[in-house]
Amino acid sequence: MSLSGKTLFISGASRGIGREIALKAAAEGANIVIAAKSAEAHAKLEGTIHSVAAEVEAVGGKALALQLDVRDEEAVKAAMAKAAEHFGGIDALVNNAGAIKLVGVEHLQPKRFDLMFQINTRAVMVCSQAALPYLKQSKGHILNLSPPLNMDSKWFAQHGPYTVTKYGMSMLTVGMSEEFAKYGISVNSLWPKTMIATAAIEFELGSREAFKRARVPAIMADAAHAILSSSGRAITGRLLIDEEILREQGQVEFEHYRFDPAGGTLIQDLFVD
């Protein structure tokens, strides 16, 4: 099913994976709500809601740029209402906004945990609640950028607080898929098999060196497209890996997603064995 004429509300869409999902859908003629905090250019971070809006329109989509802090539930409700009024509804919510700090309990400041919980777990609930009246009408999709629930202790040992907030998103995926079944809404999670070359990785690891062994965000955009273009609840309640869902769709070639074709062995992402 084409995404032409469909309206996607994407949080954290000013750069990285969110931007790539936006442009992939826009190329099919989708309406894109770019909802993110970055309204002005940043010295170290590329992209704003306005620059992505221009890119969306350049590839054939329609754009609505909304500055939004997903921690503010009243602002989220207002943004959803504005988006629905502007485009006549909402067909998909992509909860892409995220916060990361790979530090264990001993050294993590509580306010940093609060930030991760609010932007990761809590925002999924807040944004999904606000989008629900419109998704009921469209029998649409919710897609959360969160990982499989891998309970191996190694994923908790060094950065348990971050793991908890990302797993919370995935548990909400499972719960909302069942809770919203009566409305015909599909709910899934999506996570990369390998590290993706994004600003979050660059600044958390301290350099772009890891990019040589990473994939580009386009693989996540292609995987998201496969999910969001599915009809009904053909795909729902699943904690999907980008490469796996693309293989299910018949894709067998993945080398073109490498950031550096000569970069060597790809680095597996967190929570993926």
Image (spheres, helix red, strand yellow):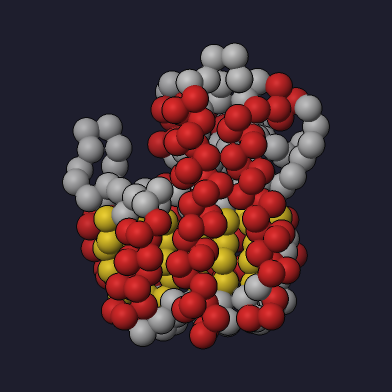
Furthest residue in direction right, as rendered: 152
* Res. 250 image quadrant: bottom right
**Location of the N terminus (image quadrant):** bottom right
Q: Residue furthest front?
A: 74
The residue shown at (47%, 70%) is: 131
Residue drawn at 41 percent across, 36 percent down: 199
What number of labels is visible?
0
Q: Name the spot of residue 191 as percent of width and height, x first.
A: 62, 49
Q: Quadrant of residue 271?
A: top right
Residue 98 is at least partly visible in this image: no
Q: Residue at x 27, y 47 (%)?
A: 38
Q: Is residue 223 left or right of residue 240?
A: left
Give residue 253's position: percent from left, percent from top: 66, 56
Q: Position of residue 182 (x, y in %)?
A: 69, 80
Is 141 situated above or below 244?
below
Q: Is residue 154 visible?
A: yes
Quarter that holds the C terminus: top right
125 vs 162, nearest the viewer: 125
Q: Is 15 left, or right, of 187 in this rendering? A: left
- 184 shown above or below 103: below
Say if 265 sits above or below 251 in the image: above
The residue shown at (56%, 77%) is 140
Residue farthest top in this picture: 106
Query: Which residue extends farthest left?
Result: 40
